[in-house]
Image (cartoon, grey):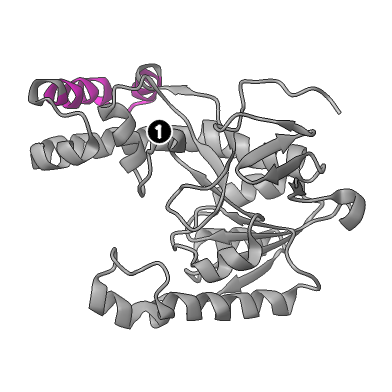
Amino acid sequence: MMQMIYNPKLHGSRMTIICFVSGSGTDYQKIAQSNPNHDYIVFTNRPGCGGAEKARANKHITIELSHLPYLRPAIKKYGSMNIPRNCPARIKYEQDAWHLIEEKTEKAPDLICLAGYDQWLTDWTVDRYHPKILNIHPGDTTKGYSGLHWIPTAKAIISGDKEIRATLFIVDKGEDTGIILAQSKPLEIIPTLRMLESQGIKGLVKGFNEVTGFAIKQGVTSYDDFEKAADKKRKAIMKQLCDNLQDALKIAGDWEVYPFVIHTLIAQGRVGIDGNTVYIDGRPIPDYGYRMEQHLPKL
């Protein structure tokens, strides 16, 4: 049976949207600017970050709770990058975070947007709020381009892709495996690198040819193989390429697809799910979601 993510006929046109941020908060800012006529609450695990400052400037409720005191024993035990997703310390942190959030809201959140949030959500939160948790990822998750920071773009380059996309999905209990709602327009890699060079960032196309030529010569076909085969210099070149491409994808991808899906689709009661199938206006869409180069019929 199809379940609406949000139904304005039942709940009204003004949503309560919780944005989780850890850094500059630009995704949150674009979402809020696109339609300020909702109730926004910003939560951050990094007190004093740019996103918290933006929220205060917007006069949105701002809640700050550092994760570090909670996770220090787990960091010491596992290392900062290897803490289990559902370890008790993470669950306790989220429970305390939600207690603070719920003190400020008069109802359950209508939507939860991970807008540059650098912590995994545990199954405790997913069980409680699915399918109302959204996240955006700087890669095409239909191709398995998971990973943090610049890794998804590196995977696309090693695979020989000519373009990259951002993917907006419903958070589930996997790593970037949730049901896809939408993908950004494709960003062509070589033209984007040339555009960035015209803005003063030198050596990007040369660097691209260096790492792709190395991959071909060494028979490297996956990012894991590249990590094993490449020297420190080539890894640094790859990181520079991907950091710049992902900055461009954030502008052309995140800042377009996130506000569109929230305000034009979900807030209008146009999105439902049934199992792993997404429906827009009652019609099923492909597994890769709605792509921004397509055109939806007008309401």
> Residue 288: x percent and y percent?
54, 31
User: Residue 218: which quarter of the image?
Assistant: top left
Q: Amino acid at mark 1?
A: Lys
**In percent of the image, x 63 and y 68: which residue is there?**
128
Query: Helix, strand, or loop for circle 1?
Result: helix
Q: Which residue is mark 1?
A: 143
**In percent of the image, x 42 and y 80: which residue is there?**
88
Tell which of 281 and 208 is nearer to you: 281
Tell which of 243 and 196 is nearer to you: 243
Please provide the residue range marked out in magenta. 192-215
**In percent of the image, x 29 and y 32: which residue is there?**
241
User: Residue 206: which quarter of the image?
Assistant: top left
Left or right of 283: which side holds 201?
A: left
Left or right of 156: which side holds 274?
A: right
Q: Is residue 202 magenta?
A: yes
**In percent of the image, x 79 and y 39: which residue is there?**
270
> Residue 58: x percent and y percent?
70, 58
